[in-house]
Every structure is written in C-alpha cells, then in structure tokens.
Image: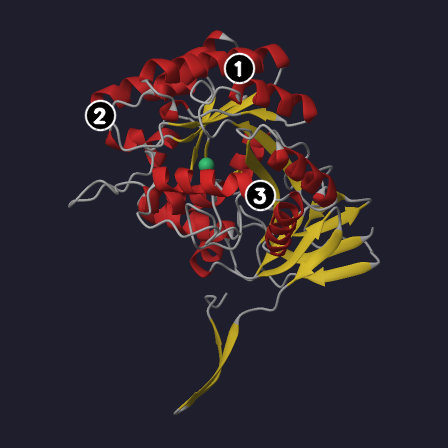
Amino acid sequence: MDLIIRDATLPDRTRADIAIAAGRIAAIGTDLALHAGQEIDAGGNLVTPPFVDAHFHMDATLSYGLPRVNQSGTLLEGIALWGELKPTLAQEALIERAMQYCDWAAARGLLAIRTHVDVCDDRLLATESLLEVKRRVAPYIDMQLVAFPQDGLLRSPTAFDNLKRAIAMGVDVVGGIPHFERTMADGAESVRLLCEFAADKGLRVDMHCDESDDPLSRHIETLAYHANRLGLHGRVAGSHLTSMHSMDNYYVSKLLPLIREAGVAAIANPLINITLQGRHDTYPKRRGMTRVPELMAAGIDVAFGHDCVMDPWYGLGSGDMLEVAHMGLHVAQMTSQEGMLACFNAVTEIPARILGLEDYGLQPGCHADLVILDAGDPIEAIRLRAARRYVIRRGRVISQSPAVRASLDLPGRPGTVDFRLAR
Ligand code: FE2
C-alpha cells in the first residue's frame, strides 16, 4: 500500500481504516492488517470524498471592484457590470485569477468544479483561457466547462454561433439563460434549441433557469418537457430556479413530479440567491432560494453551488463548500439531522452525480481523492466550517491545514479550546 488512513469516521458515521494503492482506494475496513509507505492517523475525524461545486463562474472570479462595485446588489446590475468588464479582459490576467481560485479550492478540498464560461464575446477569450486553466489544474481538480450565453442565446446575435464554436473547442456542457431573453416565448425557444443541440451532440445541459422573483417565470417546465421528450434523463440540470420560491403552491405540486419524471437535477446557489433575490421587495423580503427540501422530497437531485466568489455579483467567498452548505441549511431551514446531512451531500455526492464524475466515492476501486476534516461527522463539519487537515488527490497529500484551537488564559480555566464536541 502507498498510504493508510487509520481510524477515520466515514460520512455514515462508521469507523474504518482506508488503504490506498496506485491512486485508488484498495480496501476499507476496521483494523486493516496492511502496511504502507505512509500512515495518517485521522484520530476519529471525518474522512470524506472531496467537495464538488456544481455551479461556478471562474471567468469572473476574483475580479471584484473591476471596473467598479455593484451598487444595487441586483443580478441585472451584475450582468451590466460584467458587460463593462468583458471587453477589457486580458487572457493572462483571467488565467492568473482562475489559477489563484483553484489554489484556494484545492486547499479547501474542493476537487471538482463545473464552471460556466460566458461565450457572448466573439473573441471567446474567456473560453480559451478556462480551457487552458482546465488543462493546468487537471492533476488536482476535475473541471467541467459550460458554454454559457450570458447575454441571451437569441438576444445576442452571435451567441448561438459562439456557443457552437466553444463546444467544438472542447467545452463540455450546453448552458442557457432563458429568463434573460427578450420575451417568455424567446426564453422557451432558447430552451428548445439548446436541448436539441445537446441531444444531437450527446452533451449534458446546465441552464441558468428562472433566476428571478417572477412567479410566472416557468422555463423549468419547458426544460423538463424537452429533457423528457429528447430522452436526456439524468443529463440535465436547472440552476438557480429561484422563481419557484414565489410560485403558486398548486402549480408547484404539478411541476415537481414533471421535473422528477424528466430526471432533471436542481442546483441552488444559497450565498448568491439570498443576496441577489428579493431586492425589489420592501418588507417582508422573500428569501428567493428555490424550494430545496420540497425538491429533495420529490426525489429530485439537489446540489448547492458556490456560483460566485469576489466578482460583479458577490464580494465575498473563498471556495469553501462548507460555507455554502451552511448558508443553504439556514435559508432552507433544514435543521433536522436528516436535513443537515442532506446539506452535506448537496456539496459532495449529489453534485458528483450531476457532473457525472467517474469513480467518485468511498468504495474500493474509487479514486483516492479524500479530505480529512477537523470534525467528527458531516454535521459538525458544517457547524465549524471545519479545517481541512489533509486534502488527498489520487493518494497524494496535496494540502494540509492546522486544526483551529485557541489557548485560553481564563481565571480557574486554563487550557486549550477545541470547538469540536468531546467524543
Ligand atoms: Fe450562475
């Protein structure tokens, strides 16, 4: 064996050793009588497959303040601001920002990212740049690119041609933004065109869909219809789906089974949805995140994405999917034990399935991509946004972080504070 992790707590709270050989998990069991070149004592800490972000914008990341800050905090000002920035983008600077973000991601145990890339720039500079980033980070991050017509497939005259060029260059997934087209009818038509194109090419689909507070924005219905009609089950995701928050309950009771029947997954982006939505409300202000527990209860795969880190839409973030799960848990009020575990799964195994990652997981034969957290179980990991003590990629430790402890000097209570519960 190359590496053995001793005394790990697995996400299902069982304890085991994990043996690794040739970059893959060779065995999992209690007190494995095996020897390895390297041993790590997990000390009962949680060992999980890596975090997966199903929804990100790496072409815009770390551009906060360029050329100015979003004053209204709305999606539409963010899109306008990005439109100002786009013509000034330089390939080297974009690659450098994305590479810096990937450093953060690796250190956070975030080893698979689906990123949208704006193709509404005839130079396709961001596409070329992110394809280069994907090549450079391949040893440690699985990157999947989505051709994203930010300015509207039909609204922007060259968008469809550019999208097709991006796919020909090696972009993996077909994107869309039906709620940004000029009319509801154009939005529906864009969904049809994009789904038919994806079916023809054998590609996955991931659309920004109904990212508004308009309860009549129902493009998810059209997306589910075409996914079902074209046999794209398990290959389509609807991202954001925030209008569902404001929809009529009766309509949603019809909609959820249709999404389930079509095998369409949902991707909520809690940090962004809670800040961008409800901006036109006075009080009460709507939360604007899609109906996460109801989607899950209907048997639909739901992932939480990060969406933005320090860009025209959001000025915070650091690639920490536990922060994303933490926010999603709060906004969706998923405070039961099952709910909190589901929030952990929404940043690990569910997005891995949505991306179609192969050999992801904790079975023998899976890639030895693992994170050892300074926490005893998934719920404690979310509570503490726990330090990633070790990040392991293909059996090799690629990042280490110290445990978070404080030394106290209190009257009568000297010692060290450990924020984990004693086990
Ligand atoms: Fe997005």
Element at label 1:
loop
Q: Which residue is labeled 1 in the image?
A: 232
Q: Amino acid at mark 1?
A: Leu
> Which of 32 and 162 lies nearest the eye of the viewer?
162
Q: Which residue is labeled 2 in the image?
A: 249
Q: Amino acid at mark 2?
A: Asn
Badge 1: few (under 14), some or many (20 or more) residues near its Cα, within 10 Å? many
Element at label 3:
loop
Q: Quadrant of residue 277?
A: top left
Q: Position of residue 227 (x, y in %)?
A: 47, 14
Left or right, residue 102 beside residue 323: right
Q: Which residue is labeled 3 in the image?
A: 89
Element at label 2:
helix
Seen at 82% across and 44% down, the residue is 22
Q: CA distance from mark 1 to mark 3?
A: 35 Å
Seen at 53% across and 10% down, the residue is 196
